Image (cartoon, rainbow, N blue to C red):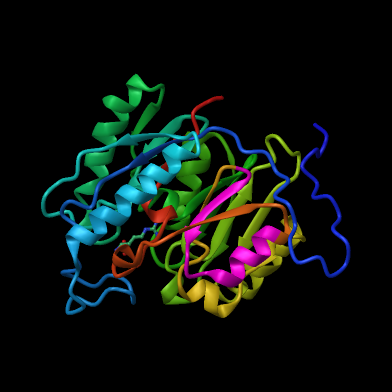
Amino acid sequence: LSPTHTAVASPAGSPETEASRAATPRHYLMCPPTYFDVVYAINPWMDPTSGVDTARAVAQWEELKATYEAHGHQVEVVDPVADLPDMVYAANGGAVVGGRALAARFVHAERRAEGPAYEAWFSGPGAVVGLKSLGQAVELNEGQGDFLLAGDVLLAGTGFRTTLAAHAEAARLLDVEVVTLELVDPRYYHLDTALAVLDDGAVSGERTLAWYPPAFSSRSQEVVRDLFPDAIVASDEDAAVLGLNAVSDGRHVFLTDRATGLHERLRERGFEPVGIDLSELLKGGGSVKCCTLELDLPR
Ligand code: ARG
């Protein structure tokens, strides 16, 4: 495939680069934050005294869903379960490759019941839209929080949640090459808080990602630099508002409106940032990507 997306070189000093990349329609799974709250703390973002406005969280979530739909993407919805306040973070529901879904097994007791809840969706309503459920993982696996598909490799985070044994299990059951990346900063406890795949290369022939190197061990930083020498590097400020917790359709990058520097970097590389206010969901330690499971159904 020819890299037809290559940004037209803009004259030096040109303030604006036209978005030049092609979007492809996507299929997402989301879970409304009906029961969202912060009543326990399993990551450094969560403060049970912070006071969550659940109605506001629902409004912000509806806005994200409507934004996806306005950009031509299809959104499935899984019923929220009472007493599972973190179920809104649908990315954690499973690891998905080529429309095959391996449901999560959560590290913390507070979220453990979400694994079977997502598995039930995968094998029920999910099957209707073409998903194939591989059942629930045996090893500790927090789904697309730690498993991000970048073309033909599955980037896999470890250090806080998903284990090395789970990486091996995913490689075997999803039949994909897994690249392990070690996370070292507790604020960036899931891979999707520190790295975003912007282009899987399916159309353009060239994979692109954005990341925050200090969140990774020095060995893993080398691995990323080797595989993705042109990756966008996010600033401390953009990482600290979870700007990397983003979803891309190849052209539009949906991310928090607060990561303004990253918006600029994305524009320079031919992407079109779409800013979303998810301030209530940030209180649980999540943003756009956390709320979105990419179903990766065969196109
Ligand atoms: N409170 C949730 C947890 O700590 C947030 C999960 C965010 N999801 C994600 N994909 N990073 O498990």
Residue lying at the far front of the rendered structure: 15
Residue 63 is situated, as x and y percent measured from the top left of the image, at 35, 50
Look at the image and tell me in which quarter the C terminus lies.
top right
- Residue 94 visible to an observer of this rendering: no
Q: Nearer the viewer, residue 147 or 287?
A: 287
Left or right of residue 188, residue 119 in this image: left
Ligand 1 rendered quadrant: bottom left
Residue 245 is situated, as x and y percent measured from the top left of the image, at 48, 60
Residue 64 is situated, as x and y percent measured from the top left of the image, at 38, 50
Q: Quadrant of residue 78?
A: top left
Look at the image and tell me in which quarter the N terminus lies.
top right
Left or right of residue 112, residue 25 in this image: right
Left or right of residue 258, residue 124 in this image: left
Asked if residue 273 is positioned above or below residue 44 in the image, the reply reads above
- Residue 275 visible to an observer of this rendering: yes
Which residue appears at 27% of the width and 52% of the height?
Answer: 88
Queried whether the magenta region covers residue 261, the answer comes back as yes
Q: Nearer the viewer, residue 26 or 109?
A: 26
Residue 293 is situated, as x and y percent measured from the top left of the image, at 40, 44
Queried whether the magenta region covers residue 25, the answer comes back as no
Residue lying at the far left of the rendered structure: 82
Which residue appears at 69% of the width and 41% of the height?
Answer: 201
Count numbered badges in the picture: 0
Q: Nearer the viewer, residue 234 or 42?
A: 234
Q: Which residues are magenta?
A: 250-267
Asked if residue 298 is positioned above or below residue 193 in the image, the reply reads above
Left or right of residue 190, residue 232 in this image: right
Q: Quadrant of residue 10?
A: bottom right
